[in-house]
């Protein structure tokens, strides 16, 4: 029983991690309809930023978060403004292949510059746990879980309570009418991508404190983000949290009772079933293409 | 003019290709040409499903890997002859494509892409972990399988040539057949195609299975050529990426696009990969970005439009 509870808790915390880096993917898809293949590379960039600042200047990983947010926002804004905006009106396949090309450029430039070494960010408090009645709760993961909640709530507030948020929503709902109402579509797209990149980079910074950091880490993150977002509903931001939790728990239980290597196979089976049975996500609020 | 000339050019080049191994060229050149043939074959397979229908298959390497393993297991554990093994490889891949394609090909574009990407990654993990999980020694997990030592490069040169011609031939036939019109109708406007009486799912499945059959077959041949395979090698996502990029560069949905794209990129790979391994992938990334932004129809597609414009002096309407 204790094993089951521990496994369940691990799954929930893992789900929080998944949600933290998937929310941006959902936002970008929801507004622009772009499936961003280099999403995982933004996690990687956030993680490397934290790694280098920590290694070179000994600054606490949690304090590097604002830096990640700002750098990734600028990165996302520029990429969308100058590259992706040029094909955003084309069929989805085009933007899909384009982001694939950007994925190659970022991942292999990183591999070239930083080599394939596995790196870790080990702080004085790494590996600290709370022990509640025999169940171990790692603090770093708990912090990410809190962050995931914060990101989802924050995005919700941004989208529903701010001027920019209303413009983003209007653009997502009807691009042409939004344009007629005086919304600068390409600027809104760039801001949306920037926000998506910023929260993804923030997640990357946190992830670096307990997962290995290396240049090729990106693609698996992209695949997981896609699964999470499909499970929760494409473009429906709170769905990232639901999707993340389901996936996290399923993977954790698989790892405990079967074999950790098979969790990827289970992820696929879950994705497969969801795409067929409930393409609009578990709560049915996602966008069905 | 070119339309009349091109069959002659193609036949003469093909006959010339058959004589190359007798020309006293270096083993290296034979090997390079054989590699190009196999890449054209793989890219052609990808082009059949993704090029014609516009459903981007990011999991094509899954069928290649399955084919590699089927041949490897048959030849190393069952001592089955090579030609029979690769045929079984193709059939097994096509058989697996049916249950995978049935649900995924109902999905629209981008969803299909990631679902297939996840499929290929899952296959890799299953081949890696199956033995450990079940407690047998069948797929040999990450240790890989060693095949019997194969014949010389010339043998694979001819096999590669035959496979390439078969794939190009089928692509050409599909383009002309009713089947091909149905596929391209799906690309243009799937809903309208359905309303016009095209059984879209059936047509897509058919194309997907043809593509998987040849990918599996090529996987089997290449496994024998490599003589040693691991899941990391034969399920490498970079293989799919190459197929996508080669098609894109040559011209998605054209018969000779894969020929141009695969030849060009394989030669660049040969020139760069040994000395600058990472630069190659970065350059491929830039090629993708530049082609998508400036030349979305690829080399062959762009030329076709130019010729069509010269001929008719009208704005291009066909592609």
Image (spheres, coloured by chain):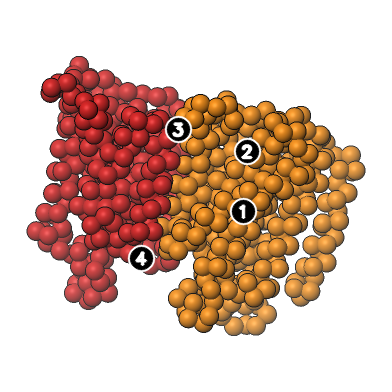
Chain colours: A red, B orange
Label 3 Cα crowd, 10 Å radius (few <14 / some 14-19 / many 20+): some
Label 1 Cα crowd, 10 Å radius (few <14 / some 14-19 / many 20+): many
- Whether residue A167 is visible, yes or no, is yes
Q: Nearer the viewer, residue B234 or B279?
A: B234
Front tag of 2 and 3: 2
Label 1 sits on residue: B94
- Whether residue B278 is visible, yes or no, is no
Residue A289 disc label: 4
Is residue B149 shown left or right of residue A226? right
SS type, badge 2: helix
Is residue B209 shown left or right of residue A249? right
SS type, badge 4: loop
* Residue occupying image coordinates x 25% and y 60%: A284
Q: Position of residue B237 (x, y in %)?
A: 52, 42
CA distance for labels 1 and 3: 36 Å
Q: Are marks 2 and 3 on the same chain?
A: no
Q: Position of residue A145 (x, y in %)?
A: 18, 37
Compare marks 4 and 3 and give the one earlier in the sequence: 3
Front tag of 4 and 3: 4
Front tag of 1 and 4: 1
* Residue occupying image coordinates x 33% and y 64%: A288
Q: Nearer the viewer, residue A51 or A27?
A: A27
Q: Are marks 2 and 4 on the same chain?
A: no
Image quarter where the N terminus of chain B lies is bottom right
CA distance for labels 2 and 4: 36 Å
Q: Position of residue A170 (x, y in %)?
A: 20, 68
Marks 4,3: beta carbons within 8 A: no
SS type, badge 1: helix
Label 3 sits on residue: A111
Q: Are marks 1 and 4 on the same chain?
A: no
Image quarter where the C terminus of chain B lies is bottom right
Label 2 sits on residue: B69
């Amino acid at each position: 029983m204790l094993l089951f509870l521990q496994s369940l808790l691990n799954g929930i915390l893992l789900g929080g991690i998944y949600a933290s880096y998937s929310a941006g993917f959902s936002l970008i898809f929801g507004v622009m309809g772009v499936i961003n293949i280099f999403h995982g590379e933004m996690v990687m960039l956030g993680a490397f930023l934290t790694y280098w600042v920590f290694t070179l200047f000994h600054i606490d990983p949690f304090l590097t978060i604002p830096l990640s947010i700002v750098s990734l926002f600028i990165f996302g804004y520029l990429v969308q403004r100058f590259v992706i905006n040029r094909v955003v009106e084309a069929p989805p396949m085009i933007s899909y292949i384009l982001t694939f090309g950007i994925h190659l450029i970022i991942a292999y430039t990183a591999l070239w510059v930083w080599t394939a070494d596995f790196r870790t960010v080990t702080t004085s408090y790494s590996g600290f746990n709370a022990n509640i009645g025999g169940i171990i709760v790692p603090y770093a993961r708990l912090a990410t879980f809190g962050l995931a909640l914060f990101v989802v709530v924050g995005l919700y507030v941004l989208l529903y309570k701010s001027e920019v948020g209303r413009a983003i929503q209007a653009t997502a709902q009807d691009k042409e009418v939004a344009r007629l109402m005086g919304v600068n579509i390409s600027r809104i797209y760039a801001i949306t991508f920037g926000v998506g990149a910023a929260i993804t980079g923030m997640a990357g910074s946190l992830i670096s404190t307990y997962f290995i950091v290396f240049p090729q880490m990106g693609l698996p993150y992209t695949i997981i983000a896609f699964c999470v977002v499909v499970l929760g509903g494409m473009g429906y931001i709170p769905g990232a949290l639901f999707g993340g939790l389901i996936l996290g728990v399923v993977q954790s239980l698989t790892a405990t009772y079967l074999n950790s290597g098979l969790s990827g196979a289970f992820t696929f089976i879950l994705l497969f079933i969801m795409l067929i049975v409930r393409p609009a996500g578990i709560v049915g609020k996602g966008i069905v293409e | 003019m070119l339309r009349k000339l091109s069959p002659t050019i193609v036949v003469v080049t093909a006959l010339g290709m058959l004589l190359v191994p007798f020309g006293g060229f270096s083993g290296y050149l034979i090997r390079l040409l054989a590699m190009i043939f196999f890449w054209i074959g793989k890219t052609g397979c990808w082009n059949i499903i993704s090029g014609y229908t516009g459903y981007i298959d990011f999991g094509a390497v899954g069928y290649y890997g399955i084919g590699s393993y089927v041949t490897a297991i048959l030849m190393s554990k069952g001592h089955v002859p090579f030609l029979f093994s690769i045929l079984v490889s193709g059939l097994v891949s096509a058989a697996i494509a049916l249950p995978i394609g049935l649900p995924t090909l109902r999905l629209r574009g981008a969803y299909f892409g990631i679902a297939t990407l996840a499929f290929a990654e899952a296959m890799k993990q299953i081949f890696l972990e199956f033995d450990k999980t079940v407690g047998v020694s069948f797929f040999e997990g990450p240790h890989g399988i060693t095949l019997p030592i194969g014949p010389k490069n010339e043998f694979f040169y001819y096999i590669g040539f035959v496979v390439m011609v078969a794939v190009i031939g089928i692509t050409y036939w599909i383009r002309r057949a009713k089947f091909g019109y149905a596929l391209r109708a799906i690309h243009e406007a799937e809903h309208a195609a359905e309303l016009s009486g095209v059984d879209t799912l059936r047509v897509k499945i058919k194309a997907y299975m043809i593509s998987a059959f040849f990918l599996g077959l090529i996987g089997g041949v290449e496994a024998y050529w490599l003589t040693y395979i691991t899941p990391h090698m034969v399920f490498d996502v970079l293989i799919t990426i190459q197929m996508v990029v080669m098609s894109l560069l040559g011209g998605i949905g054209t018969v000779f696009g894969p020929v141009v794209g695969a030849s060009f990129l394989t030669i660049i790979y040969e020139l760069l990969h040994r000395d600058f391994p990472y630069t190659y992938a970065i350059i491929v990334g830039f090629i993708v970005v530049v082609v998508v932004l400036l030349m979305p129809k690829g080399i062959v597609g762009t030329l076709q439009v130019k010729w069509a414009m010269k001929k008719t002096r009208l704005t291009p309407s066909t592609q």
